[in-house]
Image: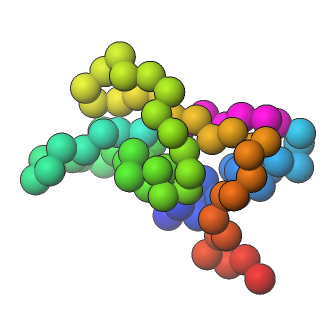
Amino acid sequence: MTSLLAHEAIDFAKRSGAQIVEAYPLINEPKKYRTLGESFLGFATTFERLGFKQASDRSRVRNIMRLDLRLGGVPAGPYST
């Protein structure tokens, strides 16, 4: 679900002329159980697969990740043709 929503947000940002999209996902430690309340912004690995790069490391749990739309190369969404 996170990947689908992120693709839609990226598409909307592109159509609106945005140059950068930011996300604030959770960095999940191996074998660490997370509750729905903790993970509602998604996991860093999902955004990494979409081409986002870590832009800050101020927290061990949640950091800023950015996708520079000027560089292109965002993977096709699950319902792309």
Q: Residue at x 48, y 58 (%)?
A: 49
Q: Residue furthest top?
A: 58
Residue beneath the point at 35% across and 16% down:
58
What predominant SS class does the magenta segment belong to? strand
Q: Given the current orientation, which residue lies at the most extreme left position?
A: 31
Question: Which quarter shows the C terminus?
Answer: bottom right
Q: Is residue 37 visible?
A: no
Asked whether, in this view, residue 23 is left or right of residue 34, the answer is right
In the displayed orientation, state which residue is furthest to the front.
71
Let me know if residue 4 appears in the view: yes
Residue range highlighted in magenta: 18-23
Q: Position of residue 63 (x, y in %)?
A: 40, 28
Identified at 34% across, 45% down, the residue is 39
Q: Picture coordinates of residue 64 (x, y %)?
A: 48, 28
Q: Is residue 28 above or below residue 31?
A: above
Q: Position of residue 32 (x, y in %)?
A: 13, 47
Between 34 and 52, the one lying in front of the other is: 52
Name the residue at 31% across, 21% down. 59
Q: Is residue 78 above or below residue 71?
A: below
Residue 21 colored in magenta in the image: yes
Number of on-image labels = 0
Coloured how?
A: rainbow
- Rendered view: 68 above or below 3: above
